[in-house]
């Protein structure tokens, strides 16, 4: 969005706060960092942080996306003589991935979320356009696909995840991809014939094309079925599979065709959300919108020609009785279920890149094992990880990255100075759950699985009950979060 639209959005937010008797000063407190970002995006200036440490050392960052480049920027701001190298193969790694949901519903154009990595490289930082493929943490070296060997004193791993559409039988996809980059192996299948996925850039644009065909069929009077999946792996932006379903519902209603469409969510898990309050709120929203769901269904195969999805339906039954423990063993049962569709949004299985997962810095589950609070590697004290690839119980969202990169920078500098690591990540995660075109439920929580809410001011907390859908959070999502990310986080200050 351009500055004019951003200003209009800010004027609307200010007018709403004025009606509620809330000053902009109080609004900033309510929005936290997001509020500061809105001010920054609407014309306020931010003072550059003064360098605070003379610590020296070669710092290598694996991954030049949001998490990696924000870390590089903050280190640059915080060190008097930084020596930082970023290894990133993609030209578009710093693109605004959370906006792909809005692209998928035709609210934004793809061009509005695509950014060039080179435009966000901090001054003085060396960018190596290559892929890290071998890790030798015992000797503090990394080798690239191009044959370079890079030596480091400290390393930060922020490589994100790979999208494993290839694990779904019948699609004919043989390789994994990332959200940005070459999507040819996947877009030859997904983005056609009713199949959609917002998790890669071209897929987000194609989702809107396929969604419009689906809506046109419903508007013509045809009875149609839309299905939306959530896999059996950890995923980034866990709310996105529901967001695109809510937006499909909204677009159908906008077209006057909702009564002709059946929309069903097929998550692998047994809840809508891990936090009870948010789970209950989403169930009520689904019921109010006549959106259906079937828990414990994992997508395993697709027949694109017949438009049939096959799910592994799983549940537990009592097995043998253990007299010593005085309880039954539980046995997982499976059944293959075929579901016809006219439109299907696929959320792919996700994993760490194999060159990291299978290396000494990886783990059996793939994710880089770190202390969940300090984000320091559990085996190598000069290695840190953050973002989607870090093995923390929560945190595969941009909002989590906003908290994590500051912890990594503070602790990395402490390690460089030979001091105790005192910065702690508290598990903060935020998911602006889009529930319609114009409303968002701002789900925030932490390690304790406790909803936190943006209402830092207790007197205003009832106004900002985080389980409520609010148009104000829509304005935050559509107008404020992108500039906060692209010009706040990526400057190392937001």
Image (cartoon, rainbow, N blue to C red):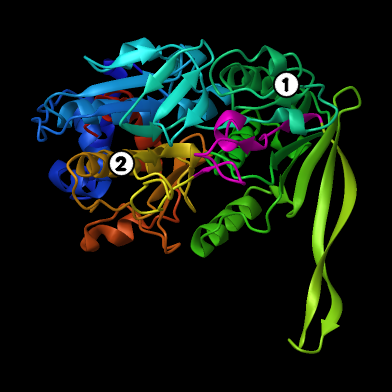
Magenta segment's dominant SS is: loop
Q: Is residue 16 visible?
A: no
Magenta range:
342-368
Q: Residue furthest front?
A: 139
Q: Nearer the viewer, residue 162 or 402?
A: 162
The x and y percentages for residue 464 are 33, 54
Q: Quadrant of residue 489?
A: top left
The mark nearer the N terminus, 1 or 2, is 1
Residue beneath label 2, please? Answer: 408
* CB contact under 8 Å: marks 1 and 2: no
Quadrant for residue 141, please give it.
top left
For the question of whether residue 218 can be seen, the reply is: yes
Q: Is residue 31 left or right of residue 46?
A: right
Find disc 1 in the rendering and name its residue. Answer: 190
Position of residue 491 relative to residue 296, above or below, is above
Q: Residue at x 64, y 47 (%)?
A: 289
Q: Quadrant of the N terminus?
A: top left
Left or right: residue 33 compared with residue 209: left
Dot 1, crowdedness within 10 Å: few (<14), some or many (≥20)? Answer: many
In this view, the residue in front, 33 or 420, is 420
Residue 82: x %, y % from top left: 19, 24
State how far apart marks 1 and 2 are (Cα): 37 Å
**Quadrant containing the C terminus in the rendered view:** top left
Residue 454 colored in magenta in the image: no
Q: Residue at x 55, y 15 (%)?
A: 181
354 drawn magenta? yes
């Amino acid at each position: 969005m351009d500055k004019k639209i951003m200003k209009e959005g800010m004027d609307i937010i200010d007018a709403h706060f004025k009606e509620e008797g809330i000053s902009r000063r109080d609004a900033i407190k309510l929005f936290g960092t997001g509020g500061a970002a809105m001010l920054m995006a609407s014309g306020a200036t931010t003072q550059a942080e003064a360098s605070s440490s003379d610590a020296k050392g070669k710092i290598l960052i694996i991954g030049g996306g949001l998490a990696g480049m924000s870390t590089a920027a903050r280190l640059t701001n915080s060190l008097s003589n930084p020596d930082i190298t970023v290894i990133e193969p993609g030209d578009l790694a710093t693109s605004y991935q959370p906006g792909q949901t809005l692209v998928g519903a035709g609210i934004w154009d793809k061009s509005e979320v695509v950014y060039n990595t080179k435009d966000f490289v901090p001054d003085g930082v060396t960018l190596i356009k290559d892929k890290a493929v071998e890790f030798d943490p015992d000797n503090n070296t990394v080798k690239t696909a191009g044959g370079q060997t890079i030596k480091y004193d400290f390393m930060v791993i922020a490589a994100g995840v790979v999208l494993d559409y290839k694990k779904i039988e019948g699609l004919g996809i043989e390789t994994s991809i990332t959200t940005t980059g070459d999507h040819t192996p996947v877009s030859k299948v997904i983005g056609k014939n009713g199949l959609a996925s917002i998790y890669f850039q071209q897929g987000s644009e194609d989702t809107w094309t396929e969604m419009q065909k689906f809506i046109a069929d419903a508007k013509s009077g045809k009875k149609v079925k839309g299905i939306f999946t959530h896999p059996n792996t950890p995923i980034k932006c866990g709310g996105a599979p529901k967001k695109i379903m809510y937006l499909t519902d909204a677009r159908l209603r906008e077209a006057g065709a909702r009564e002709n469409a059946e929309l069903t969510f097929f998550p692998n898990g047994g809840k809508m959300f891990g936090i009870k309050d948010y789970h209950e709120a989403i169930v009520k929203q689904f019921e109010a919108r006549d959106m259906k769901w079937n828990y414990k269904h994992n997508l395993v195969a697709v027949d694109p020609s017949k438009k049939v999805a096959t799910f592994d339906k799983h549940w537990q039954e009592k097995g043998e009785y253990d007299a010593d423990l005085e309880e039954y063993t539980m046995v997982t049962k499976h059944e293959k279920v075929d579901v016809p569709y006219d439109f299907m949004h696929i959320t792919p299985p996700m994993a760490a890149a194999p060159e990291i997962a299978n290396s000494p810095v990886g783990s059996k589950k793939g994710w880089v094992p770190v202390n969940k609070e300090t984000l320091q590697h559990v085996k190598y004290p000069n290695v840190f990880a953050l973002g989607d690839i870090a093995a923390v119980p929560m945190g595969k969202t941009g909002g989590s990255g906003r908290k994590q990169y500051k912890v990594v920078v503070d602790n990395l500098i402490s390690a460089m100075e030979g001091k105790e690591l005192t910065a702690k990540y508290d598990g903060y995660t935020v998911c602006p759950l889009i529930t319609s075109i114009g409303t968002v439920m701002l789900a925030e929580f932490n390690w304790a699985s406790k909803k936190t809410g943006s209402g830092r001011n207790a007197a205003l907390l009832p106004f900002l009950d985080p389980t409520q859908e609010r148009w104000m959070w829509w304005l935050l999502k559509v107008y404020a979060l992108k500039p906060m990310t692209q010009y706040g986080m990526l400057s190392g200050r937001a």
